[in-house]
Image (tube, rainbow, N blue to C red):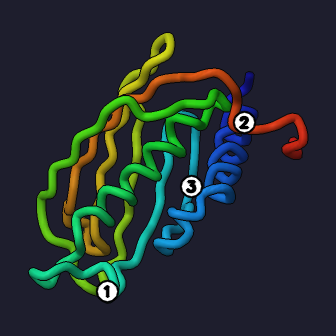
Amino acid sequence: MTSLEAMSLASRCAQTMFDRDAATQGLGIRLISAAPGSCTLGMGVRADMIQGHGTCHGGFLFALADSAFAFACNSYNDATVAIGYSIDYIAPAQLGDTLTARCTEQSRSGRTGNYDVRIENQQGQLIALFHGKSYKVRGTVLTPETPHE
């Protein structure tokens, strides 16, 4: 497969995953870009995401990172699920912030992979670091009916 074909496949897989993902869409998360083993998502911090200390609830940050991880590890058209993850909250996200989550594949071999997600705000300030472990299961992301370029 050429790199152009791999990029096209990753984009189609990410868009298909996004289109099926009501939870991600419901949070207002936007698909910015996808490539083999990577994905970038964006999310604005809304008033309904603010917790008792006046900052973005960590669950929303986790959901943003988890979605970026899911789209990245499924970018090869192999159905892949999470088998573990951790997140470190570095700085609080504030109401009105525009967050960007960039997921990068660190390793992929056999059925498992390791992925890191970096969440930053609009000033490039680090908000959270996420690490996810993936496991390839049976099946594909794209169905035979999914249009191909």
* Local secondary structure at mark 1: loop
Residue closest to the eye, 97 or 81: 81
Using the image, determine if residue 23 lies above or below residue 137.
below
* Quarter occupied by residue 59: bottom left
Mark number, residue 96: 1
Rendered location of residue 36, percent (x, y): 57, 35
In the rendered picture of this protein, how many numbered marks are placed on residues? Answer: 3
> Which numbered mark, 3 or 2, is in the foreground of this view?
3
Q: CA distance from mark 1 to mark 3?
A: 22 Å
* Quarter occupied by residue 121: bottom left
Using the image, determine if residue 29 lies above or below residue 63.
below
Residue marked by disc 3:
33
Rendered location of residue 64, percent (x, y): 39, 59
* Quarter occupied by residue 4: top right
Q: Amino acid at mark 3?
A: Ser
* Label 2 packing within 10 angstroms: few (<14), some (14-19), many (20+): few
Rendered location of residue 2, percent (x, y): 73, 26
The residue depicted at 13 percent of the width and 82 percent of the height is 52
The residue depicted at 52 percent of the width and 72 percent of the height is 26
* Label 1 packing within 10 angstroms: few (<14), some (14-19), many (20+): some
Q: CA distance from mark 3 to mark 2?
A: 14 Å
Q: CA distance from mark 2 to mark 1?
A: 36 Å
* Local secondary structure at mark 2: helix
Disc with the residue nearer the chain's start (3 vs 2): 2
Residue closest to the eye, 122 or 139: 139
Residue marked by disc 2:
4
Q: Amino acid at mark 2?
A: Leu
